[in-house]
Image (cartoon, grey):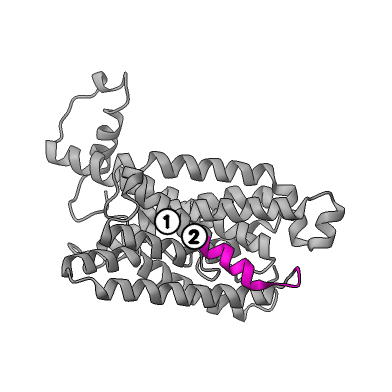
Amino acid sequence: MLGPVRIEPSTVWKIAFSHIPGLDRWLEPDWSKAQGNIVWDIRFPRVLLGAVVGGGLAVVGTAIQALTRNPLSDPYILGVSSGASAAATLVILFGAFQLFGQYALSVSAFIGSLIAIVLVYMLARVGGVLSNTRLLLAGIAVSMMLSALTNFVVTMVPKEEGIRSAMFWMMGSLTGAKWSYLTFPSCIVVAGTLYLLLQYRSLNALLMGEETAVTLGVNMDRFRKVLVILTSLLTGVIVAVSGAIGFIGLMIPHLVRLMVGSDHRRVLPVSVLLGASFMIWADVFARLVIAPEELPVGIVTALCGGPFFIWLLRRSSYSF
């Protein structure tokens, strides 16, 4: 399969099936130990983590765009990713939040993302009214401030190795994927996606405006708070395992709406599948383009996202 080390597809599937109870006895191991380690301990966790990250970011982008009724909203623009990155950088460089043990990175990223989005809402809500324009402007301002804070912290660290690790992580990477990293983010992303699928009628109502949603029986205050906490949790968990990867939460929901319309009963599952597929292939490209070195996958997603939105802006028929 694709990678710096060439392994035949048939060998890859044999190695995968050999780890399924009951099938291993029917397979004769004709692969080396090194091949087994590369496929099962390196590539499979990385592919699965890429699927979780891509699908999760697409779901977060879909939810935030419905919440704000603005197609330009995503975890980056609203400052959620920047908040998660700022807190997670403190863990990477200074070992903060160590009382949470192996979940220190995930917990810190969640706390950072929650603080960021709450701050954005406080700044954007004036006189009890939440304006989408103010929300975007507040999100951009908070995102810039938190990004500046993160960069300041990174540059003040005396250890050069720590700076390189933090900078590579901030640009997004799946390099450190392990089986042990998959369980927690997978459960959170699956649970969050299922909840949003159950609430697809409320999400559809949000697109028609707050007054219409209330008329249709949506408790706006409660539902908005739930969405804020849920998107913060999803973003924090994803950023903790992959770093800050942009454009997926912005680009994939747009593309899905062009394909299936705006009904969240279809948008959410298709976004998960398309986001996962895009993330996997973006990571493959990042690993191969300058092999044996690799690019941060966030660079690849940005290179894809920019031209996509230039094309989207040229389409006069597109609407949210």
Amino acid type at mark 2: Ser
Asked if residue 281 lies left or right of residue 71, the reply is left
Tell me the SS state at disc 2. Answer: helix
Q: Residue 139, position in %: x, y?
A: 56, 72
Quadrant, the C terminus: bottom right
Asked if residue 163 lies left or right of residue 50, the reply is left
Q: Residue 108, position in %: x, y?
A: 40, 54
Q: Residue 305, position in %: x, y?
A: 47, 71
Q: Main secondary structure of the magenta part?
A: helix
User: Would residue 42 be visible to someone looking at this image?
Assistant: yes
Q: Residue 61, position in %: x, y?
A: 56, 60
Q: CA distance from mark 2 to mark 1?
A: 6 Å
The residue stretch that appears in magenta:
115-128
Amino acid type at mark 1: Ala
- Which residue lies under the disc numbered 2? 113
Q: Is residue 135 magenta?
A: no
Does 68 sit above or below residue 44?
Answer: below
Q: Residues within 10 Å of mark 1 (few under 14, many from 20)?
A: many
Q: Residues within 10 Å of mark 2 (few under 14, many from 20)?
A: many
- Which residue lies under the disc numbered 1? 109
